[in-house]
Image (cartoon, rainbow, N blue to C red):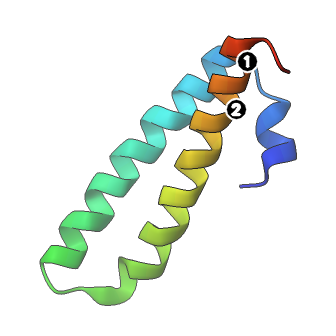
């Protein structure tokens, strides 16, 4: 997900996205541990997207919008 799109969301929507990403990442990590390597690329991208959301939330908390 692009940072520009994420910046357009309000804080509650970002929190909802973060919760969904955490759930998806948990499932993908479970698949990887079970030997299904199809989820490896998706898990890497999910971690990056999650970091983007955390960064935007932190910027807003500091008042940098």
On screen, residue 62 above or below 36: above
- The residue labelled by disc 2 is 56
Q: Quadrant of residue 12?
A: top right
Q: Is residue 65 above or below residue 40?
A: above
Q: Which mark is residue 12?
A: none
Q: Is residue 63 left or right of residue 23?
A: right
CB atoms at circles 2 and 1 under 8 Å apart?
A: yes
Instruction: Tell me the quadrant of the picture where the C terminus can be found.
Output: top right
Q: Residue at x 64, y 36 (%)?
A: 55
Quadrant, the N terminus: bottom right
Mark 2 Cα shell of 10 Å, populated few (<14), some (14-19), many (≥20)? some
SS label for mark 1: helix
In percent of the image, x 83 and y 43: which residue is there?
5
Residue 37 locus on image (x, y percent)? 30, 88
How far apart are the alpha carbons under marks 2 and 1? 6 Å
Element type at marker 2? Answer: helix
Spot occupied by residue 4 in the image (x, y as percentages of width and height): 87, 44
Q: Which residue is mark 1?
A: 60
Q: Is residue 34 above or below residue 28?
A: below
Viewer-nearest residue: 42 or 57: 57
As drawn, the residue found furthest toward the left would be: 34
- Left or right: 18, with 23 as reference point: right
| Residue in the image at 38% along x and 44% along y | 22
Would you say 20 lies left or right of 57 here?
left
Going by the image, does 29 lie left or right of 21? left
Q: Residue at x 83, y 19 (%)?
A: 64
């Amino acid at each position: 997900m692009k940072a520009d799109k994420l910046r357009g969301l309000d804080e509650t929507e970002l929190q909802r996205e973060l919760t969904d990403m955490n759930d998806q990442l948990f499932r993908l990590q479970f698949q990887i541990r079970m030997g299904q390597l199809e989820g490896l690329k998706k898990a890497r991208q999910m971690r990056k997207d999650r970091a983007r959301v955390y960064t935007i939330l932190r910027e807003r908390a500091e008042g940098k919008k």
